[in-house]
Amino acid sequence: VMSFPGGASHLYLLDSPDWIHGTADFTLEAWIRPNALSGQHGIIGQFYNSSGSFSPMALIQDSGNANIYCSSTGSSWNIALATPIDTVPALAWTHLAITRSGGEIRGYKNAVLKRTIAANSDLFNSTEVMLIGAVNTSGANSFSGYIGAILLTQGVALAPSQFMFSSPPQA
C-alpha cells in the first residue's frame, strides 16, 4: 500500500516494453482509498511530461468519479476522454479494473462491469514514465490517499472472478 499525502508526492517507473498494449488484451487493477473527492487526481498512467504527449491509458479520480482516458495518437484522448467508470467514495477502499478484450475496453468497480468503450485502434506506444499518484512528472494533480495492490496483466483480459477483489489492502 502506498500513501500519498497530496502535494507533489508520486511514484514513477521508467518506460518498459511491458506497457506496450497496441491492440493486445490486458487487465489493469488497483485498489484506491481517496482522502477527498474534489478536483482531478492521477491514479496510474503513462502521463505526459513537458513533451505534451497523452497516455495510452490512464485511470484518474476526478470529482468523485473514477475515469478512463485512452489515446491511440498520443496527441488527444481520442478513444476515451474522462469516461466515467463510476463514483468512488472518500475514505473507503474501492477496487477498480480496466480490461481490454478484442475491440472493447471495460471499466469495473468492485468487480461489477460499469462501462464499455469501443476501442478498435492500437493504444499509443508512449515512452513516458509510468506515474502512480499524479498526472505528470512535476506532481501536478497529485492523488491524496492510498493506492494499493496495482496489477497489470498483459495478454489477457481477466474475468471479474479472477480479479484481486476478495479483500482490500490494509492501510
Image (tube, rainbow, N blue to C red):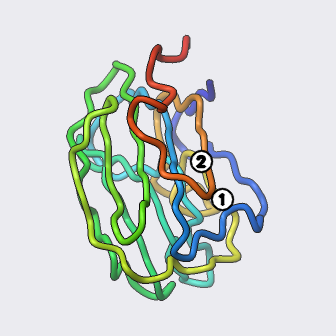
Check residue 130 in the rendering and tell me which mark sits there, or answer none. Answer: 1
Residue for point 28% across, 37% down:
37
Percent from the top left, x then y, of residue 48? 57, 73
23 relative to 18, above or below: below
Residue for point 50% across, 76% down:
123
* Contact check, label 2 and label 1, Cβ < 8 Å: yes
Residue for point 54% across, 59% down:
45
Percent from the top left, x then y, of residue 47? 56, 67
Spatial separation of the CA atoms under disc 2 and disc 1: 7 Å
Residue corresponding to mark 2: 132
Amino acid on which the number 2 mark rests in the picture: Ile
Q: Is residue 148 left or right of residue 143?
A: right
Check residue 9 in the rendering and tell me which mark sits there, or answer none. Answer: none
In-front residue for pair 15/138? 15
How packed mark 2 is, by other alpha carbons closer than 10 Å (few <14, some 14-19, many 20 or more), is many
Q: Is residue 10 left or right of residue 114?
A: right
